[in-house]
Image (cartoon, helix red, strand yellow):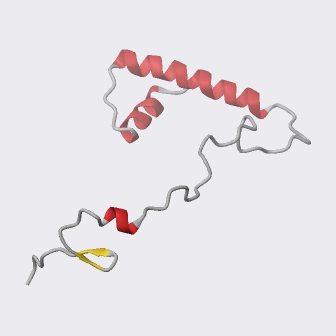
Amino acid sequence: MKLSRDEVQRVALLARLRLTASEEEQLAEQLGAILEYMEQLNQLDITGVEPFSHANDAVTALREDKEVNQPNADALLANAPERDGSFFKVPKIIE
């Protein structure tokens, strides 16, 4: 599918790109090649092919979110200038 120069200029305008004439021609060829490939893909028979969201079955690399180190309130407040139970006591700064 060949793109016209007007179509490329419209895409460039929407993408807020300033293109030279040679860049417009190059982009028209590249976009045309991409659209031709998409047309080839649309002609494939995909009957019975299950849709998928990922190309592989990789498990996420993130660890499970669980608490592993619970802070000790007394140790955290040991060097506090003032404390009120299990809280830091700070001077009032807004009246």
Q: In which quarter of the image is the C terminus?
A: bottom left
Residue beneath the point at 34% across and 25% down: 19
Please tell me which residue lies in front, 81 or 21.
81
Asked where in the image residue 55 lies, by quadrant, the reply is top right
The percent coordinates of residue 88 (x first, y second) are 25, 72
Asked where in the image residue 33 lies, by quadrant, the reply is top right
Please tell me which residue lies in front, 93 or 73.
73
Left/right of residue 57 with respect to residue 4 in the rendered view: right
Left/right of residue 85 with respect to residue 57 in the rendered view: left
Q: Quadrant of the N terminus?
A: top right
The percent coordinates of residue 51 (x first, y second) are 79, 45
Asked where in the image residue 71 lies, by quadrant, the reply is bottom left
Residue occupying the far right of the picture: 48
Left/right of residue 84 with respect to residue 73 in the rendered view: left
Residue beneath the point at 45% across and 30% down: 8
| Count of numbered tags | 0
The percent coordinates of residue 20 (x first, y second) are 32, 20
Residue beneath the point at 87% across and 40% down: 49
Residue occupying the far bottom of the picture: 95
Residue beneath the point at 71% across and 30% down: 39
The percent coordinates of residue 86 (x first, y second) are 34, 76
| Residue 2 shows in this picture | no
Please tell me which residue lies in front, 78 or 53.
78
Q: In this view, does 53 lie above or below 74?
A: above
Q: Is residue 90 above or below residue 28?
A: below
| Residue 50 shows in this picture | yes
